[in-house]
Image (spheres, grey):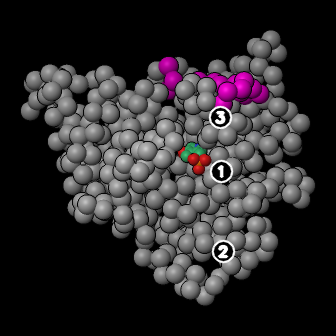
């Protein structure tokens, strides 16, 4: 730990919340060099949906490495890439009636967003992108321009332009119709909003505070995009790959995005892999117009292909995620109901859920208390005001209960210390 504090840049983040040295991980647990087990309800910010080093992916990966399978090949053809494309198409896209071209834009989520924004601008010949309050799309300049957080935006050091932020679903209250607001702005030639190329959204704003868009809102945004000839980009980097239940988070809304961004848990093994799905007729890229040295990570293709086959060939995992999500929300509701003086609300979908806390500081105090009790959890939201409960999708009921018990204990401790839990049952 001293080495990290001495040599790694100040920019380091999570190590400050979790100041221990991890050595290995398996399933829903991480193990430190001091032989302590931590239950992981953080899941690599959504990059470890199947847990740490999942067995169904590990052996194929080891076999591939043992056989000197090609590790790096830029975007040359490799048999692992062919298998990935074929498997993703046959298991994920075709059964959902989806037809998309697949672009490997570079290894990270923000690369998938940059590619989508660039292509939307190229195809429409327009510059402006509409994004939403509390959005998070990544740290490179294009993605940062459509990200809400002022602190992160300021890190750019240059003006972030060509984007307009609009109120997300439920931004003001439950009644105010923010889709109608966007529509009015687009329809009024005097609104001051230049005609955009695209609208980019997350169906659940994970970093932005677990804000869940209503299905009807998503449908209306899609309709507005169609009526105004705008492209619809869904950033499913964190909410996708099963986090909300179905493989794509927007499936229950029945919408058809023009561009879809995936990354985080796509490889299934915590290996970097990103994908931009493109409506076929929009694939106007010239060869090499957007490139990158680490497009197409063959090791990640191996694990992703096996993850898709193993976890998504039927709907068993999806059903299990939805079932466990109900357990989590019910439990969180019960938890906050014990403390009538605690101003809190529960929200989420599938296995991305949270408790919005007031005062905001309660959230970080609770996750610090969880860490003390060997449970890893983070906070999200504009003021880090939301306790983010995000176990791996494969968590079993006993570990789920264990984590929620720890969370409750920690919450109770914080509320008692703050004198908020006086009347607690
Ligand atoms: C994490 C995330 C990104 C950025 O991905 P990186 O791999 O960190 O670049 C973009 N959008 C959403 C919704 C994310 O959660």
Q: Position of residue 60 (x, y in %)?
A: 53, 81
Res 90 visible: no
Q: Quadrant of the C terminus?
A: top left
CB atoms of marks 3 and 1 within 8 Å: no
Residue 161 is covered by the magenta coloring: yes
Q: Is residue 21 above or below residue 362?
A: below
Residue at the image position 51 percent from the left and 39 percent from the top:
11
* Residue highlighted by disc 1: 261
Tell me which segment is drawn in magenta. Answer: 156-172
* Residue highlighted by disc 2: 71
Residue 281 is covered by the magenta coloring: no
Residue at the image position 68 percent from the left and 45 percent from the top:
113
* Residue highlighted by disc 3: 144
Q: Is residue 374 above or below residue 80?
A: above
Residue at the image position 21 percent from the left and 55 percent from the top:
402
- SS under mark 3: helix
Distance between the alpha carbons at the discs numbered 3 and 2:
31 Å
Which mark lies nearer to you, 3 or 1?
A: 3
Q: Position of residue 419 (x, y in %)?
A: 14, 21
341 lies left or right of 57: left
Residue 301: quadrant of the picture: bottom right
Which label's residue is closer to the chain start, 3 or 2?
Answer: 2
- Badge 2 crowding class, 10 Å Cα cut-off, few under 14, some 14 to 19, many 20 or more, is some
Asked whether mark 1 and ligand 1 are closer than 8 Å, the reply comes as yes
Asked whether mark 2 and ligand 1 are closer than 8 Å, the reply comes as no
Which mark lies nearer to you, 3 or 2?
A: 2
Distance between the alpha carbons at the discs numbered 1 and 2:
24 Å
176 lies left or right of 353: right
Residue at the image position 31 percent from the left and 22 percent from the top:
359
Residue 49: quadrant of the picture: bottom left
Question: In front: 46, or 222?
Answer: 46
């Amino acid at each position: 730990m001293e080495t990290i504090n001495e040599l790694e840049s100040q920019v380091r983040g999570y190590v400050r919340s979790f100041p221990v040295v991890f050595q290995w991980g398996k399933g829903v647990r991480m193990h430190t060099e001091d032989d302590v087990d931590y239950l992981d309800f953080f899941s690599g910010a959504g990059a470890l949906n199947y847990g740490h080093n999942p067995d169904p992916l590990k052996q194929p990966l080891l076999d591939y490495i043992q056989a000197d399978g090609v590790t790096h090949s830029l975007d040359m053809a490799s048999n692992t890439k062919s298998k990935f494309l074929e498997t993703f198409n046959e298991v994920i896209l075709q059964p959902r009636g989806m037809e998309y071209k697949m672009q490997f834009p570079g290894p990270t989520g923000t690369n998938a967003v940059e590619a989508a924004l660039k292509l939307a601008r190229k195809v429409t010949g327009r510059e402006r992108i509409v994004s939403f309050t509390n959005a998070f799309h990544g740290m490179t300049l294009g993605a940062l321009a459509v990200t809400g957080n002022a602190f992160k935006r300021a890190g750019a050091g240059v003006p972030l332009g060509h984007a307009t932020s609009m109120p997300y679903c439920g931004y003001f209250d439950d009644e105010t119709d923010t889709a109608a607001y966007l529509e009015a702005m687009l329809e009024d030639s005097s609104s001051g909003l230049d005609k955009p190329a695209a609208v980019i959204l997350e169906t659940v704003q994970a970093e932005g505070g677990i804000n869940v868009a209503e299905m009807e809102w998503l449908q209306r945004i899609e309709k507005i995009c169609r009526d105004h000839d705008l492209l619809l980009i869904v950033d499913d980097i964190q909410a996708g790959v099963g986090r909300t239940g179905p493989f794509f988070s927007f499936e229950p809304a029945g919408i058809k995005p023009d561009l879809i961004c995936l990354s985080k848990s796509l490889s299934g093994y915590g290996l970097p892999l990103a994908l931009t799905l493109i409506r076929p007729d929009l694939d106007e890229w010239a060869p090499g117009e957007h490139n990158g040295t680490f497009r197409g990570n063959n090791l990640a293709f191996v694990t992703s292909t096996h993850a898709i086959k193993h976890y998504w060939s039927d709907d068993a995992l999806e059903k299990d995620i939805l079932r466990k999500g109900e357990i989590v929300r019910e439990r969180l509701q019960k938890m906050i109901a014990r403390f009538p003086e605690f101003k809190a609300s529960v929200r989420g979908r599938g296995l991305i859920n949270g408790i919005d806390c007031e005062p905001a500081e309660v959230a970080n105090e609770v996750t610090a208390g969880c860490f003390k009790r060997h449970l890893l959890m983070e906070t999200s939201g504009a003021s880090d005001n939301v306790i983010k409960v995000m176990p791996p999708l494969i968590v079993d009921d006993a570990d789920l209960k264990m984590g929620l018990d720890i969370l409750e204990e920690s919450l109770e401790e914080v509320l008692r210390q703050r004198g908020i839990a006086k009347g607690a049952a």
